[in-house]
Image (tube, rainbow, N blue to C red):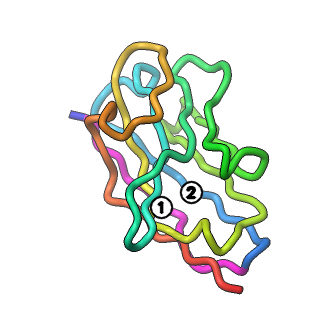
Amino acid sequence: QVQLVESGGGLVQAGGSLRLSCAVSGRTFTQETVAWFRQAPGKEREFVAVSPRNGGSTLYADSVKGRFTTSRDNAKNTVFLQMNSLKLEDAAIYYCAARSGGTYLYASASSYANWGQGTRVTVSS
């Protein structure tokens, strides 16, 4: 069973930046496709970005494209989400999720069996 632990959330002013981390353990990291989702109060969980396990193109939600970047450090078993030019509507709890094997980049939450506990991002005006 894989374990995921997010960190890096906090309070930031609109226009600012944050970098979230997702530490992955319990399975071979290079076998894991790791995605980021977020959930704002009263809203459904939504896809943000997904990092392929074997490198290559990354998939982003239209709402974050050009502002957010996901990357991974295989030596540290960690996936990052760099968030720039944050907007008020980016405020949410951010979760990382993993699925093992395959190369397809899934944007559906139901495609991921393993989830972290989430880290809160608050954006102030």
Left or right: 75 in relation to 13: left
Q: Is residue 9 magenta?
A: yes
Q: Do the residues labelled 2 and 1 touch (CB within 8 Å)?
A: yes
* Image coordinates for residue 43, horizontal then vertical, percent: 40, 65
Does residue 52 show up magenta in the picture? no
Image spot of residue 51 (x, y percent): 56, 32
The quarter of the rendered structure image containing the C terminus is bottom right
Q: Find disc 1 in the rendering and name its residue.
A: 7
For this orientation, the residue located farthest to the left is 1
Q: How many labels does the image show?
A: 2
Q: Give the range drawn in magenta.
A: 2-13
Q: Label 2 vs label 1: CA separation?
A: 6 Å
As rendered, which of 36 and 41 lies closer to the eye?
A: 41
Tell me if 58 is positioned left or right of 95 in this view: right
Check disc 1: other Cα within 10 Å, few if <14, some if 14-19, many if 20+. some
State the residue position of label 2: 20
Q: From this view, report whether residue 80 is shown above or below residue 44.
A: above
* Residue 27: image location, x then y, percent: 30, 28
Considering every residue shown, the one lying at the far front of the view is 43
* Amino acid type shown at disc 1: Ser
Q: Earlier in the sequence, mark 2 or mark 1?
A: 1
Name the one closer to the observer, 62 or 105.
62
Answer with left or right where residue 123 lies relative to residue 37: right
Type of amino acid at the residue the image marks with label 2: Leu
Q: What secondary structure prevails in the magenta region? A: strand
Local SS, label 1: strand
Q: In which quarter of the image is residue 122?
A: bottom right
User: Measured from the top left, where is residue 113 in percent x and y?
Assistant: 26, 35
Q: What residue is at 63 percent from the left and 77 percent from the top? A: 123
